[in-house]
Amino acid sequence: MASKTLRITEIFYSLQGETRTTGLPTVFVRLTGCPLRCVWCDTEYAFHGGKKMSLEDIISTVESFGAHYVTVSGGEPLAQPNCIPLLTLLADKGFEVSLETSGAMTLVDVDPRVVKVMDFKAPGSGEVKRNCYENIQYLDHKDQVKFVIADRRDYEWSVSKLIEYQLTDKVSDVLFSPVTNHMAADKLAEWILNDQLNVRFQLQLHRLIWGDKAGV
């Protein structure tokens, strides 16, 4: 039987720039392709191209960095069906694995050992219609949800979803991020504090360190 493969944009070793493990050395496996077109997307280079790799070669490359944390991202990683067995293989190898997903693809088959970091697409993304709210049932106390916020409308929409789905009781962290170079970070921080929200404000650490480029 032929080995399972995935189309990979890049595999690199860096500091985690977002989520609750911010700052920890992490191997990133960025899969190619995404069915969404968020207007503020910062990884458009992952929409096309990439190279085909076997799951075995991906695992070998990840192991070569000697890290404990692995993040599988995209694009939208779940757009490639073989992402599911990759996540399981990484967990079997003893890595602490996280999956960064748009929330537009079902999470039903994701290995329960994997930390799911799921986006909610706010109106400013242009893809609010792609939110798959059924995925909320597949989230648990170790998982995280993320809102990327471009303006006050996005913020109020995000707060409404936070309340409607009782997200702070469902997952470990609710993450609020400003759209880089569009939403003032201090303004979003002010709104969070004024409303006394139980959320984690975050900036993209890797961009603060290295700027806007791939492979970091």
Image: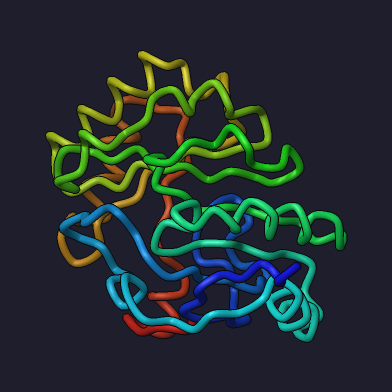
From this view, report whether residue 138 is shown above or below residue 109.
Answer: above
The picture places residue 68, in percent across and down from the top left corner, at: 79, 67
**Residue 38 in the figure: left or right of residue 73:** left
The residue drawn where x is 35% and y is 41% is 147
Q: Name the image quarter holding residue 43.
A: bottom left
User: Camera-side residue: 85 or 90?
Assistant: 85
Question: Please, which colouring scheme is shown?
Answer: rainbow
User: Camera-side residue: 202 or 53?
Assistant: 53
The picture places residue 96, in percent across and down from the top left corner, at: 76, 56
**Residue 23 in the figure: left or right of residue 210:** right
The residue drawn where x is 26% and y is 53% is 36
User: Camera-side residue: 183 or 7?
Assistant: 7
State how many labels appear.
Answer: 0
From this view, report whether residue 208 is shown above or below residue 70.
Answer: below
Q: Name the image quarter holding residue 203.
A: bottom left
Q: Name the image quarter holding residue 79.
A: bottom left
User: Camera-side residue: 180 or 35?
Assistant: 35
Q: Quadrant of the N terminus?
A: bottom right
The residue drawn where x is 78% and y is 59% is 89
**Residue 10 in the figure: left or right of residue 88:** left
From this view, report whether residue 119 is shown above or below residue 33.
Answer: above
The picture places residue 95, in percent across and down from the top left corner, at: 80, 61
The residue drawn where x is 16% and y is 38% is 123
The picture places residue 84, in percent across and down from the top left corner, at: 63, 51
